[in-house]
Image (cartoon, helix red, strand yellow):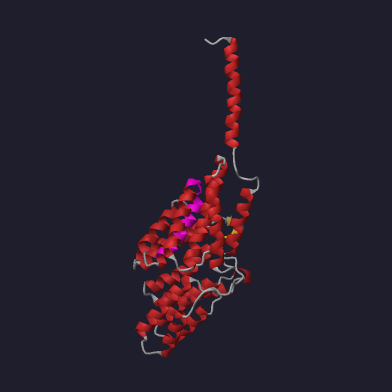
């Protein structure tokens, strides 16, 4: 047994150690306003997504992603680490979409994976789900429907049940089934998307101050049009594309999305082409390429249109004119005033 004097010395040393433990737990190289600054910066990048050319936003977001990586390697607290991991994930999620807009699927998928991993490390299920939403879209445009469906289902395991993102991910799975020629799979998954929509709360959550409900609305209006095109059901595609286009054109100016309108026009053009009306198809194709924001997803779908028209109507000069115009389409495009996210 230690003497009273020895016991007192041990307790005194323990008190000093406890103070050191506390100091170590609070040790950080982050300035007092660093996390607030990152929150503001990530929000501004998300708002800039549809306002500025993708190249400019990509460069700025990548610079911040590197800054967050450096902060993660520097001394910080455990609480700060979770927040830094989340900021890293959000920046990578946005970089995935920007790389997709710029036509680089490999980079887009790499950042989507990075966003998912950092979201999981941060314990942020919603972020993981957003990352898989990006991966699903990118894989669809790369003609990998099985991988798109896998990404959507992976995202659904992380997404909050009453979040608009759940609607969108079910719709992504439906679109992937249609791209794979699975009509029954499309019907089942799209019914799940509509069921999830009816469960949304009166005030759906926002993401960096942005209303994300339009993303669910978009998935329920535009995705079926695209899906019915892939399933060869032209009349169904025409009806859904007309509904989607009317919805986008009637939206308030501040929330209009030129890219989505362009894709809806291409879906409608493909429906007309399948129904035997090449003149209207070509006219709608030109209207789509008049869009203020012709990102890679728009060019990709326009390529589907021109390829179909060339096969079905090989001798029409108007078809060749549309193909030549698409081939000449280059960046940068003029920048619209829109706050909508994630165009594909």
Q: Residue at x 51, y 67 (%)?
A: 343
* In the rendered image, the vertical position of residue 97 relative to residue 288, given as above or below: above
* Residue 171 spot, x, y in % from top left: 45, 63
Whether residue 255 is visible, yes or no, is: yes
* Front residue (pair 168, 260): 260
Q: Quadrant of residue 103?
A: bottom left
* Residue 106 spot, x, y in % from top left: 41, 62
Magenta span has 124? yes
* Residue 198 spot, x, y in % from top left: 51, 59
> How many numbered markers are drawn?
0
Q: Which residues are magenta?
A: 121-139
* In the rendered image, the vertical position of residue 225 relative to residue 317, given as above or below: above
Magenta span has 332? no
Whether residue 170 is visible, yes or no, is: no
* Front residue (pair 155, 314): 314
Dominant SS of magenta comes to: helix
* In the rendered image, the vertical position of residue 177 relative to residue 83, given as above or below: below
Looking at the image, which residue sits at the far right?
33
* Front residue (pair 242, 84): 84
In the picture provided, is 3 more to the left or to the right than 233? Answer: right
Q: Residue at x 46, y 53 (%)?
A: 116
Q: Residue at x 57, y 18 (%)?
A: 10
* In the rendered image, the vertical position of residue 267 relative to residue 6, given as above or below: below
In the picture provided, is 125 more to the left or to the right than 24? Answer: left
């Amino acid at each position: 047994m230690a003497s009273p004097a020895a016991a007192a010395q041990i307790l005194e040393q323990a008190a000093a150690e406890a103070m050191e433990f506390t100091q170590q737990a609070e040790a950080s190289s982050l300035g007092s306003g660093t996390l607030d600054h990152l929150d503001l910066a990530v929000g501004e990048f998300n708002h800039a997504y549809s306002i500025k050319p993708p190249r400019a936003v990509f460069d700025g977001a990548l610079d911040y992603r590197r800054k967050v990586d450096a902060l993660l390697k520097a001394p910080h607290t455990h609480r700060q680490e979770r927040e830094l991991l989340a900021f890293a994930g959000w920046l990578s999620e946005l970089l995935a979409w920007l790389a997709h807009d710029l036509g680089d699927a490999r980079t887009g998928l790499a950042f989507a994976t990075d966003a998912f991993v950092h979201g999981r490390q941060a314990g942020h299920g919603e972020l993981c789900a957003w990352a898989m939403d990006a991966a699903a879209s990118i894989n669809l445009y790369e003609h990998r429907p099985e991988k798109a469906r896998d990404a959507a289902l992976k995202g659904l395991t992380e997404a909050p049940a009453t979040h608009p993102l759940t609607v969108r991910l079910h719709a992504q799975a439906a679109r992937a089934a249609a791209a794979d020629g699975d009509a029954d799979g499309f019907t089942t998954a799209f019914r799940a998307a509509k069921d999830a929509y009816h469960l949304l709360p009166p005030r759906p959550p926002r993401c960096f101050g942005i209303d994300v409900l339009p993303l669910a609305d978009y998935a329920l209006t535009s995705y079926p049009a695209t899906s019915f095109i892939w399933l060869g059901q032209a009349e169904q595609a025409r009806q859904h594309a007309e509904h989607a286009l009317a919805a986008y054109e009637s939206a308030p100016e501040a929330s209009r999305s030129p890219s989505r309108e362009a894709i809806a026009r291409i879906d409608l053009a493909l429906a007309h082409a399948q129904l035997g009306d090449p003149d209207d198809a070509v006219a709608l194709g030109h209207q789509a390429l008049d869009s203020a924001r012709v990102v890679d997803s728009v060019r990709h779908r326009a390529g589907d249109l021109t390829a179909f028209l060339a096969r079905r109507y090989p001798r029409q000069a108007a078809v060749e004119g549309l193909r030549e115009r698409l081939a000449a389409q280059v960046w940068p495009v003029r920048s619209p005033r829109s706050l909508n996210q994630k165009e594909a």
